[in-house]
Image (cartoon, grey):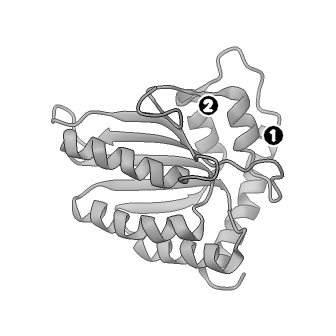
Amino acid sequence: MAGDENVRVSEKLHFNTFEFEFENLHYAEGRGQTYVIFDVKPQSEGGRGERLWGYVRNKPLGDHAEVILMSKINDHLETHQDNYTMTWYMSWSPCGKCSSELVPWLQNLLKKQHKLTMHFSRIYDKDRAVDHRGLCDLQHVVSNGFQMGVMGQTEVDTCLAEYVEASGCPPLKWLHMTDSNATQMQDKLSSILMNRF
């Protein structure tokens, strides 16, 4: 554990937490926290860079997971200067407020030749207009250095293999529905990004 209880570095997420929080439901009742599994890897071997991985969750009634993670990554980049490729696996897409903080942060990252790919299990749209506008604003940043999209079977398998404490655990209860739900979620995201939702 590093820093505070909401950031876990070099620690895998518990299987039961992943199974509950990352199920890609359209109506995900009882799932009020956002979890982000992250991996920040140097782009080249033998450089000064150092890998940073783990997971972060939002502080109830406090900072959102993305804001906490941006701060953690900024600290890491200052002390371990190199070019990095970053991957985030998120239980929810960023809300509108987080998107407004992510956009300039991402633009700064991309200027410094870092890369980020963001996958999310569900689309957050509690404040529909604001949250959808935030996703559209993020889409405008999409480039060779930044990509975002919905988690499918490949991303779930990667999480289970690398970032979730899943040894000895049964298969995910919802694994067989992952791709069909992801397709519906991707269609919803595409509609949002084309301002049709």
**26 and 59: which is toward the camera:** 59
Location of residue 107 with respect to 14 vertically, above or below: below
Location of residue 169 with respect to 105 vertically, above or below: above
Residue 55 in the image, given as x and y percentages of width and height: 52, 37
Q: Secondary structure at mark 1?
A: loop
Contact (CB < 8 A) between labels 1 and 2? no
Tell me what residue is drawn at x 54 percent, y 77 percent. Answer: 136
**154 and 21: which is toward the camera:** 21
Describe residue 26's horizontal placement relative to residue 117 as left or right.
right
- Numbered mark located on residue 174 in the image: 1
N-terminal of the pair, mark 1 or mark 2, is: 2
Label 1 and label 2: CA atoms lie apart by 13 Å
Query: Which residue is at the far left?
Result: 47
Tell me what residue is drawn at x 40 percent, y 62 percent. Answer: 146
Mark 2 surroundings within 10 Å by alpha-carbon count, few (fewer than 14), some (14 through 19), many (20 or more): many
The number of numbered discs placed on residues in the rendered structure image is 2
Quarter of the image where one finds residue 126:
bottom right
Mark 1 surroundings within 10 Å by alpha-carbon count, few (fewer than 14), some (14 through 19), many (20 or more): some
Residue 148 in the image, given as x and y percentages of width and height: 51, 61
Residue identifier under label 2 = 160
Three-letter code, disc 1: Trp
Tell me what residue is drawn at x 40 percent, y 52 percent. Answer: 70
Tell me what residue is drawn at x 69 percent, y 85 percent. Answer: 196
Describe residue 125's horizontal placement relative to residue 72 as left or right.
right
